[in-house]
Structure formats: C-alpha cells, structure tokens
Amino acid sequence: MWNTVNHPTGHFLLLVSLLLSGPSYALTTYTDRAEFETSNPGLVTEGFETNNLGVSTSKQCPQPLSSSSNNTCFLTDQLIPGVEYGLQENPAGANLSLSVDAQTSRLGANHAADSLVITFSDLGVTAAGLEIQCPFSHAGSVKFFGVKGLITEQIVDCLAAPVFVAITSQQAIIRIEAEGGNTGTWELVDNLTWGASPVKFNVFTERVSFETMYPLLKREGFEAGDLGGNGSRACPSPLDSSSDNDCFSPGDLATGVQFSIQSNPLIPQLALSGPKPGRTITLGANGFSDYTVIRFSDLDTTAVGLELYCFTSPGPANIRFYGMDGLITEETIDCSASAEFIAVSANKTIVRVEAEQVGEHEFMDNLLFGKAATQLMFKDGFE
C-alpha cells in the first residue's frame, strides 16, 4: 500500500507500509490478573507470605534478598528460587522494607527516593506481572527490561489500591523496576508472578510465503565459500563471520549466526558441497552420523527458515527449533536431492536449529533468519 503526503514546500514523504497478515508476536500487556494467568498457565507467584515476621509488622530488610537469604525478614528457602530483590544502582538508602498486615505482605524500597529492582536468573522468563501500590502518589512506574534493554514502561494509578500490571514478550524478561511515580515516593509490591509464556509458532513449507510475510530477514547462501577448485571441501567447525580458513574469510558469512556440528561428533568437520544444476553451494556435517547445528546470537531472532538437501539417500529428516528454555518444535520433512524448505516463526527467541537425517548426510542452503515482525519503511523524496 502506497500513501503519498504532499507538503506546501513541494517535499513529500513516501510511506511504504508492509501490512502483513502473519503473526508478529508483539509485546502484550495486561491489567487483569485473571486474564494474564488464563493466557499463561503454570506461572509461579511470590506473595512474600512466608517470612520471619509477625502480623502487623513493618521491618527493614537487608538487600539483596533471595531464596538463600537468612536474616530477620526471610529465612533460607522462604522466598521462591530464581528471583533476587534489591535496589537500583547508587541508592539513597541501604535497605528494603517488608510490610505485613492481616491481609497480605508487601515488599518495597525502604527509602522514598529508591525503587525496587526484581531480577530473574532464568532466561526463559517471557511472562511477568505484579501488583503495585503507591501510598503517597497516584502515579506508579513499572519498567520491564530484557537483555537488550527496556522492553516497556507501564504507568499506573496506584494510590487508592494495588494495581496489577503484566506483560508477555518474545524477548526474555530479566529485570523489573517498580517505583512510585514521583521521585521521593514509596512503592510496595505484592504477588509477583513469572514464568514462560506458552509457545506459539507457525510452520512454513513454502519459501515464497515465508519471505513475503517476513521480507527483511537476513540470508546466508554460502556463495562466498571456497571449494579450492573441487566439488566439495571439508571445513573446520564452528564457522561464523569471523572465520579465517580454507573455506571462508572474515566477512564472508553473515553476522549473528554460527554453523557447527553436535557435541562429540564422529568427524569434527563441516563440509561444503559445490553447485549442481538447481542449487548453489551448500553446507552440512561432514560425517554420516553427525548433524548440523545453527546458533543465533541476536535475541530478536524469532523467524528462521532453510532449504535442506539429502544427496546420498532420500528419506525423512528432522529439523529441531529451540528457544532459551528448550524445544519449540521438531518438524520432519521428506528430504531428497531437491530442495525441501522448512521454516518457523515463534513468539520466543530461536537460539538454535538442528538439522539431521539419521545416518546420512544433510546439507543446507539459503538460510533466512531475523525478527518475525511487520515493518514500516519511510523514504524522503524531493520534487
């Protein structure tokens, strides 16, 4: 769809909008706990109820706090493992505050100028939420962070009563910062809930559909591979954009991806196979009993596709797509000397793909990888 906006100066802005019907797996926010928990079953909740205090008590607590803490607020294993509670860098105060009454227990920073920082040790956390109350301010801030930085900040009115806020994200959530809306006000947090959101994915077996849906993916076709004048060539494993060997020079391979073979291989090598009618250079494991492993370093990688060839013996091949917390899906294709395309887009980071034809050689070509998202492109034109 093309839209042209004319301006009095004669300049115009051309907006190219790729309005795609496929899933982009964007960030989802929640303000209703029941909806959040229904959409993301099996999450863990920490209510701070198991503590070392009596009822109707407020107490300063040393920070950070975790399941290994053993102090006047929490004994060892009273907090659920996998989370640490502390303060921001360079805090005004030194402690947290635990408030216990007849209804519930809440945790927050003890100094009004500080914020509560919640850190997750599990990189598989893609769903997280909490209740926040701000005793002396209408506005409260809850910031969700991933490995690449801020995912989103949610501003809530939390003066009259606790307010629930939560997100699911394709990027792992590593930290939450909760703060009273204005510097110099307190925040109290209760019922922290976290875990892995359900895996959602789509499988593609047709390259055109996949590329049309996600047209800005990176592509690696191994065209820069050096066969040394032969029809094939053994290559060291792993290979990436920094490789400098007989097969590839630095910069020959796309950034953000590494090619290798599985642990404890029969033959610790990859191999290039030269172009033949209907295909270009391909890459795969050099041993019959070995298989090819592709690893992605960019945490925005949520769409991956490739062509697979099985030259020596046509038959079923297995392609396994993994996220940070394990297998997303395993797909089986009929692999032969002709290209068979397989691709997956998911609501989680794809960190690894394994391609295996058991007991035989498998080779890949035209790897596509990147973010499964709709895109907007802007272009300035001048008359």
Image (tube, rainbow, N blue to C red):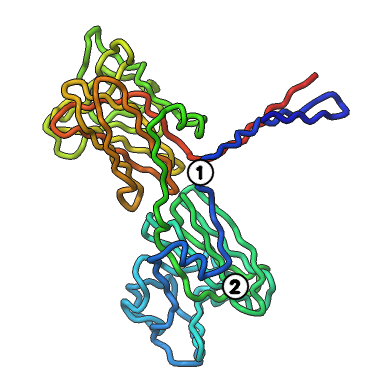
* Earlier residue among tags 2 and 1: 1
Residue drawn where x is 43% and y is 41% of the image = 345
Residue 163 bears which disc, if any? 2
Nearer-the-camera pick, 268 or 215 = 215
Secondary structure beneath label 2:
strand
Nearer-the-camera pick, 40 or 141 = 40
Q: Position of residue 55 (x, y in %)?
A: 47, 92
Instruction: Please identify the residue farthest to the right as the structure is shown.
Output: 8
Q: Position of residue 180 (x, y in %)?
A: 63, 70
69 in relation to 35, above or below: below
Residue drawn where x is 29% and y is 43% of the image = 330
The amino acid type, in three-letter code, at marker 2 is Val
Q: Quadrant of the C terminus?
A: top right
Secondary structure beneath label 1:
loop
Residue 23 bears which disc, if any? 1
239 in relation to 104, above or below: above
